[in-house]
Amino acid sequence: MMIVSACSPTAASTQTRVPVITAAPNSTATATPFQPLLVESSTTEVLETPTAQVEKPIWGDYPAPQVFPYYLGIPSPAEIIPQPKGQTNILLLGSDQRPYEGGFRTDTMILITLSPEGEVSLTSFPRDLYVYIPGWMMQRLNTAYGYGGFNTLAMTIEYNFGVKPDYFVLINFNGFRSIINSLGGVTVNVGSTFSDARDGYYPNYYTVYAGPQLMDAETALWYVRSRYSSSDIDRLRRSQEVLQAIGMKILSLDGLNRVPELFDAYKSNVDTNLSVEACLRFLPALNLLSDPSGIRRYVIGYEQAYDWVEPSTGSQVLVPLPDEISIVMHQALNSP
């Protein structure tokens, strides 16, 4: 039995009386409901609280997106493709930028790969490839440069295709015309007869036939941009043909010995991080432009991507197939 008593206050009678509980002399202790088990051990084991594992985001070490996709998820970063030591990759960009207009897209994107052995390969990327642009969102590849400049586009190419370009050359419509006009036109080796709409021609169609064709600036620009009667993939092939024609024309004008002069003449028409010293280092490889058979040409096409309509905008894009693209990129980059 428990005895409850109260302590008499030693101070004024207005103080609160606090009850004190004491045990009776003949009471027994109440057993502890859960007795701890005694474990004999020669050592003392210290139990550590496990550290929470933070899962790495799907985009890895690249900047996180500002806008998350509602439909297709963000793909994992592509594995970096090994390349021969001393190999250089230059990204040639053709933009649709017009005078007095701010925003633009890079509708032509060709990666020029110069190997240490002097081999040259051209790899074209469709403008409508739907890729992750690090630090921004899932969007068409041709919007990356306009959003964040060359650094963002280079990071986008690396993230999605496993290679980071070293240099870039950006040419707009006016620059393209100026370069071809200064060369007196270029002779393009047209792969197949091509007809498409062209302003100023009745009935709005113009045709170039297969084989070598001399083109002025306006015709060459029409040739690389038209796609109403064909596809964006075919347009990539035509862009490579014109690029090769420009290179051959420069070589025919003793361009290799006039690099500093040509660099000064064209630098106002292009935006680039190439220096004249870097151009001089690439001269041995550029000699191959005079021999069309010595250049390997690749296109990321319908075997490496598929059509998809983005539900929220209704825009048709090309969704990359990473494994198939990796096969092409390994070949283009001379991967060991």
Image: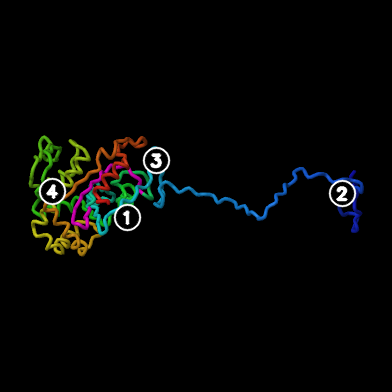
Q: In this view, does 159 lie above or below 281?
A: above
Disc nearer the start of the sequence (3/2): 2
The circle on residue 73 is 3
Residue type, numbered disc 2 = Ile
Query: Is 280 in the magenta?
Result: no
Image-based side of 205 in relation to 53, left or right: left
Q: Do the residues labelled 2 and 1 touch (CB within 8 Å)?
A: no
Q: Which residue is label 4 attached to?
A: 293
How far apart marks 1 and 4 lie (CA) works out to: 33 Å
Q: Element under label 3?
A: loop
Disc nearer the start of the sequence (1/4): 1
Residue type, numbered disc 3 = Gly
How far apart marks 1 and 3 lie (CA) works out to: 23 Å
How far apart marks 2 and 1 lie (CA) works out to: 78 Å
The circle on residue 151 is 1
Q: Element under label 1?
A: helix
Disc nearer the start of the sequence (4/2): 2
